[in-house]
Image (spheres, rainbow, N blue to C red):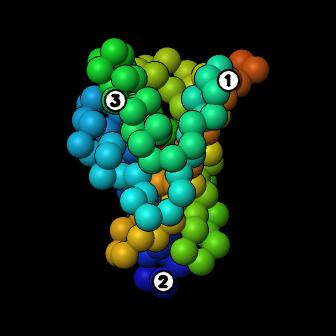
Amino acid sequence: MTYAEESESAVLAANAQFYRAFSEGDLARMNALWAEHAPVACLHPGQPLLLGRDAVLRAWRDILEHQPGIELSGQEPSVQLFGDTAIVYCYEAASDQPAHLAATNVFVLEGLAWRMVHHHAGPLAEPRVPRRANDLN
């Protein structure tokens, strides 16, 4: 396996961890996933831009505490690598419903781990059914 393939696989694993942390309401896992040294930002649908790790993690704490039991998946993930930065594009679906949001998740390599520095989700014009069952993460 090449370095690029290993990196892409590791980024996809980090992306899957993000959706797992959300679905399980796991704030500790969510905190561990976000970068500690690089600047971070988050843009939730219909909400103002959040800048800085404290603001972003405070928002995730509020979401995870008040919306338990929502199983969110990142469908059809696609990765672009730029050295120590990676962008994942995917569609977000809740539970067994078709995807209703498009998401961009940006990661940087901190130490040996890919950490999230940006999450942006916005509504799709119409729900999207995944192309293949193995596209779900």
Q: Residue type at mark 3? A: Arg
Q: Residue at x 33, y 25 (%)?
A: 64
Q: Secondary structure at mark 1?
A: strand
Of 104 and 127, the residue lying toward us: 104
Vertical position of residue 1 compared to residue 124: above or below: below
Q: Residue furthest bottom?
A: 2
Answer yes or no: do the residues labelled 2 and 1 have beta carbons within 8 Å?
Answer: no
**Image quarter of residue 71:** top left
User: How crowded is the residue under tag 3: few (<14 C-alpha within 10 Å), some, or many (20+)?
Assistant: some
Q: Residue at x 34, y 29 (%)?
A: 61
**Image quarter of residue 62:** top left
User: How crowded is the residue under tag 2: few (<14 C-alpha within 10 Å), some, or many (20+)?
Assistant: few
Residue on which disc 1 sits: 123
Residue on which disc 3 sits: 61
Rounded to the nearest angstrom, the CA distance separating label 1 from label 3 is: 22 Å
Quarter of the rendering occupied by the C terminus: top left
User: How crowded is the residue under tag 1: few (<14 C-alpha within 10 Å), some, or many (20+)?
Assistant: some
User: Could you tell which of marks 2 and 1 lies nearer the N-terminus?
Assistant: 2
Rounded to the nearest angstrom, the CA distance separating label 2 from label 1 is: 34 Å
